[in-house]
Image (cartoon, grey):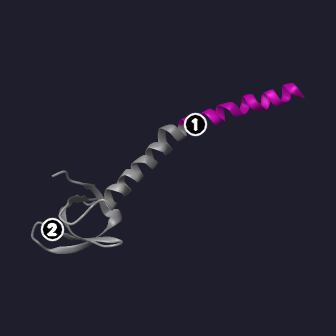
Amino acid sequence: MEGQSADILSSLLPLVALFAIFYFLIIRPQQKQAKAHKDMIAGLKKGDKIVTNGGLIVEVVKVEETYFLIKNSDNSEMKLAKEFVAKALAE
């Protein structure tokens, strides 16, 4: 009986090691990146320049709960959903 439990443990060990590698190389970095992006979006304020997922560089005019009111280079204003902000530009 003792040999059988050792066989089960030795067959599960590679699966556990594979999951641990998968977690530390893929899942954890994605979670950290998502949290950093969420914090960046929460920290945006009027006057900040951002890049949208479409590649537009715009300025935040007003921060709402689920979207930003943004201004383009030709001073036209439009709404942008918060999830479409790619990054904030350093000034």
Q: Residue at label 1? A: 20
Q: Name the residue type under label 1.
A: Ala
Could you tell me which residue is drawn at 68 percent across and 31 percent down? Answer: 13
| Quarter of the figure with residue 67 | bottom left
Q: Within the image, what quadrant is residue 61 found in? A: bottom left
| Residue for point 38% across, 57% down | 38
Q: Main secondary structure of the magenta part?
A: helix
Residue that sits furthest to the top in the current view: 3
* Residue positioned 79% across, 28% down in the render: 7
Location of the N terminus by quadrant is top right
Vertical order, 33 against 80 (above or below): above
User: Residue 48 appears in which quarter of the rendering?
Assistant: bottom left
Q: Disc 2 residue type?
A: Asn
Q: Does the magenta stretch include residue 39?
A: no
Residue 45 badge: none
Along the polypeptide, which appears first: circle 2 or circle 1? 1
Instruction: Reply above or below: 51 against 46.
Output: above
Image position of 6 (left or right of 90): right
In the image, taking residue 25 as reference, residue 6 lies left or right, namely right
Any magenta on residue 3?
yes
Q: Name the residue under label 2.
A: 72
Disc 2/disc 1 C-alpha distance (Å)? 46 Å
Instruction: Name the spot of residue 15 as percent of width and height, x first.
Output: 65, 36
